[in-house]
Image (cartoon, rainbow, N blue to C red):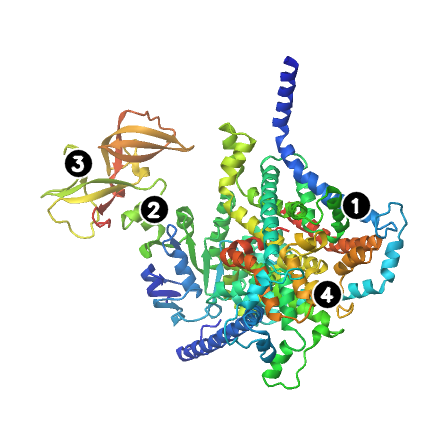
Amino acid sequence: MAFFSDLYFIMFKWLEKNLPKVVLAPAVGLISWFVYGFILWTFYISFTNSKILPKYELWGVGQYVKLWKTHKWLIAVDNLLIFTVLFLVICIVIGIVLAIFLDQKIRAEGVLRTIYLYPMALSFIVTGTAWKWILNPTLGIQKLFIDMGFENFTFDWLVNREMAIYTIVIAGVWQSAGFVMALFLAGLRSIEDEIVKAAKIDGANLFTVYWKILIPMMRPVFFTSFVILVHISIKSYDLVVALTQGGPGISTTMPALFMTQTAFHKSQVGLSAASAMMMFMAVAAVIIPYLYSELRRENVS
Amino acid sequence: MKTLKIENLSKNFGTTEVLKKINLDIDEGNFLVLLGPSGCGKSTLLNIIAGLETINEGNVYIDDYNVSNVEPKDRNIAMVFQSYALYPSMNVKENMIFGLKQAKTSKEKIEEQLKKVSTFLHVDELLNRKPSQLSGGQRQRVAIGRALVREPRIFLFDEPLSNLDAKLRVEMRREIKKLHQRLKTTVVYVTHDQTEAMSLGTKIAIMNHGVIQQNDTPEIIYNKPSNTFVADFIGSPSMNLISGQLVKNANNTLFIPKGSNQSNNIPIKNYNFAKPLDETGKDVYFGIRPEHIHYKKTNNTDFEVNLMTDLKEYIGHEQIITFNYFEQEVLGKFPSTEKIETNKEIKLFFDLSQISIFDKNTNQRI
Amino acid sequence: MSANISTASYKQLEQKSKVTNMLLRWFLYSVLILFASYFIFPLYVMIVTSLKTMPEIRQGNLITWPSQLNFKPWAVAWGGRGYGAGDTFLRPYFWNSIKMVVPAVVASTFIGAMTGYVLTKWRFKGDSWIFLFLLFGCFIPFQAILLPMARTLGVLGISNSILGLVVVHTVYGIPFTTLFFRNYYVSIPNELIKAARIDGAGFFKIFFKILLPISAPIIVVTVIWQFTQIWNDFLFGSTFSFGKAAPIQVALNNMVLSSTSVKEYNVDMASAIIAGIPTLIVYVLAGKYFIRGLTSGAVKG
């Protein structure tokens, strides 16, 4: 009897001392398994010749070679680059412009901000569905302009192999530009107004104040927006599925789409894993330098 | 011609009156300090002089030109801020010449000014550094340099030392004073620190609730405060204000402390009353600074008083004793070398040449 | 330097700047309103289209107003056409999403709160590394874990089930919720905890009696963020479920894509709005917190 009560006592004391770590265990355990463990599994599988079911014998880099010879993948990567560059540039330009304009003591600023940001509350499926209708080749924008008098107006980008990718840009920008605006507005507002006063006394006009002083101070916000937008872009799946399903044909396919289709429709698990790892590496290439520089800044200050 | 003249200036923020019919002027080369507690309107006044705030009523003149509606950049002023407000993305050199570039000054003149000012302030080694790489004191000097380089008519300082630690503050204070002595510039300087005001200013304008309480040299403000607010604000510890009655009879004027039994009246002689007193008794404050209460008789004007010691605070070279004087608290400041016991009634001497008397109802000096 | 300006030219300067100011304001407001229309346009089109009949849609264009408010498309979108098998409508999937979102939000928020609490108030050697370890989960492209997760859910017997989705969303929500709570608790003074310990409170008591009561702002931010993310998810929903257990975004996409008989655009739009309403309502009511969640999560990296 005494033995057990001693045991309980010891266990209790240990628990008390290590309670914080015990409480931490579920989160750490789950993430280790479901994030790190899973990524390693996918990484491993990308080096096997798995088709429908995973095989565990290593096959070397065959899947990667195959991947980069696959026409569909190359189109996906190409589309990703086009989309990312346009998405990034347009979102940031619109975001900065709106933020600067809203910073000018505008009436109804709250209403405008709400309007610019609400698309972020919607899912990409809802966004894709709405824009799919708006860009409908016969009944959408085309008909609208024709009805307004531009008789020969055509807007069939959605079903045009060359132009379809740009429809994804339009919808994507609509969804995310407001977010960039919110970041820049918060950044501008966090600057103490003594700097603007000093600039006014130094004789700078409004344009110069923004161009030479405030915007250069927004470097961290540029950085953050860049990272987040690239991240969103690489992960683009929902929007593409809803808007174009990767079509017409495969002209708007993207890496995320490729990965899912290869795994679940084409039963090429190994190839799919390789594509997933490529996506992972692309994200890591952007995120890791960013986190590193953020940490360095925090440690220095 | 006054370098700066403020005429009947009023300013409201919404329904709050922040400045009420302010009148002020400065001669060239003067160092005017705007002193007061937070919310008194001093920063607003400074911003109005700079052109960063609009005016509701009144005018501002610089060198006799009405600049009330002129942009800051055309007023020939420069300003140093509490947070230095250096442009973070530019280095020291770019910070200092930014204003000159905006004014389209010639390259040669810019180089000349930069060299002159940066050597003068010892920031010539720092020209390529960014503000984040400078210490607090260096940043302050660059901020001053940015102002100096434009050779303005008036320098405006908005609590520039408040962000520095105590030691640095004292150092920079002396540097600013040296600067002023050498350059003989006209300065308007805002602070809430009365030691800073007293040591730096040639004139001090004390403000409270949007009104200038007194505008005089530091000596006059210290020795002849014009109302109880000034008397209380200046001096550490502040002036004792003893309640009582001022009674004038045929031969002399007497101060009767409240609660006394007419046996401890203080005769008031050689006091410069603003207007002759009438015969009736008047409720007043008798003001005397702690350092003007002496342990031993020092002057002929000293008057002997009996006080009961209560508390003793030793602060190094001095000690501050709290006394009981007819139920009122009176503070005295003495050298620590004097041995003063607590809870004892002792004899002290009020230096009657240094007193101030205030009307209790209006708080004004009489 | 400049002092020689006469009063007459002062007046001119004043006049000129008043006019340029007005022009500037005009320009500002026009641009802002232009963009506002770009952002509002899809919502307007969705609503208007959902209230028209199909003949009206074909005759009119995107912006024409319906001749009368026709709610039939909404009824169809929500409850179907009433002809049994093959008839897809949103109602059951809406409830699927609710059943999925609520437990996932609660679980991930709670775990995030406790984890954030431990990492900030019970510091130990290496805890910053653990935070980084967890944070990493915010950035991974989920394509890297889809394959192993599909297998795991199958092995556990919860594939194609709401429970499976709850697990997935909880696990991948942990990095975000931890980030939010950790950043919030970091700025709560440690003196509060020390005082409580001196008063004799233990680990859990401190959490429930002291921290939790002052955590309302961050709980709101976290819940809004998680609710929006999980309700709007499509990738997990479409990969790990199909048919009866699908969440609403998957159902929406299926409904819109199904090419059985004639396309009913008004039903499509009504469905999209229904799928988007919950997150939109949350955004309109608590938008401030939504934005705070977006910008704080982003700015802190």
| Residue placed under numbered mark 4 in the picture | A245
Tell me the number on the disc at residue B233: 2
Residue that extends furthest to the front in the rendered view of this protein = C83
Query: What is the chain letter for disc 4?
Result: A
Under mark 2, the amino acid is Phe
| Front-most of residues A151 and B336 | A151
When the figure is inspected, residue A51 is found, relative to residue A85, above or below; the finding is: above
Rate crowding at label 2 as few (under 14), some (14 to 19) or many (20 or more) other CA atoms within 10 Å. Answer: many
**Callout 3: residue from which chain?**
B
Which residue type does callout 4 highlight?
Gln
Helix, strand or loop at mark 2: helix
Secondary structure state at the residue bearing disc 1: helix
- Residue topped by disc 3: B265
Marks 4 and 2 sit apart, C-alpha to C-alpha, by: 76 Å
Residue visible at 62% across and 20% down? A9
Residue at the location (79% across, 45% down)?
A: A40
> Which circle marks residue A118 in the picture?
none
Question: Mark 1 highlights which residue?
Answer: A40
Q: Report crowding for label 4: few under 14, some 14 to 19, many 20 or more residues within 10 A (C-alpha).
A: some
| Circles 4 and 3: CB atoms closer than 8 Å | no
